[in-house]
Amino acid sequence: MAMSTTEIARLLNAAITNANIEVQGGEGKYQVQVISSIFVGLNRVKRQQVIYRVLNDHIASGAIHAVNMNLKTPDEATSGTQA
């Protein structure tokens, strides 16, 4: 059974403190936007690994089929750039 966007946001908020998190989508396909200082100094792959560590059990179970990620530091969010 697919997860709700609220459930995914709750998991991410529990794992990544002081973050701006938005989750959209449904039926197993989601778009996740996270703005957090946890991403400072991390390349795109390392940033995605942070999210996958939180969601991996749900991906493995089939509750989440696809995740499109937009992961930025606060500075990147205000300047419009991304690693």
Image: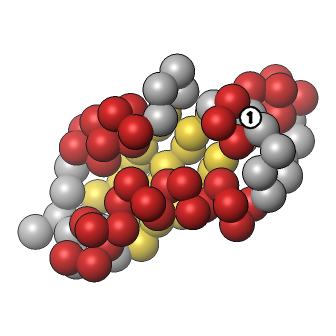
Which residue is located at x 38 percent, y 33 percent? 13
Residue 5 visible at all: no
In front: 46, or 77?
A: 46
Q: Amino acid at mark 1?
A: Thr
Left or right of 78 on screen, residue 69: left
The secondary element bearing badge 1 is classed as loop
Q: Is residue 12 visible?
A: yes
Q: Nearer the viewer, residue 50 or 69?
A: 50
Query: In the rendering, at what x and y percent does residue 1 appear?
Result: 10, 69
Outermost left residue:
1
Compare residues 61 and 40 and report the one nearer the observer.
40
Mark 1 lies on residue: 73
Q: Position of residue 75 (x, y in %)?
A: 83, 26
Up the image or down, 42 lies above or below 67; here it is above
Task: Give the vertical position of 34 relative to 2 (above or below).
Answer: above
Image quarter of residue 80: top right
User: Where residue 71 sits: x, y (%)?
Assistant: 65, 47
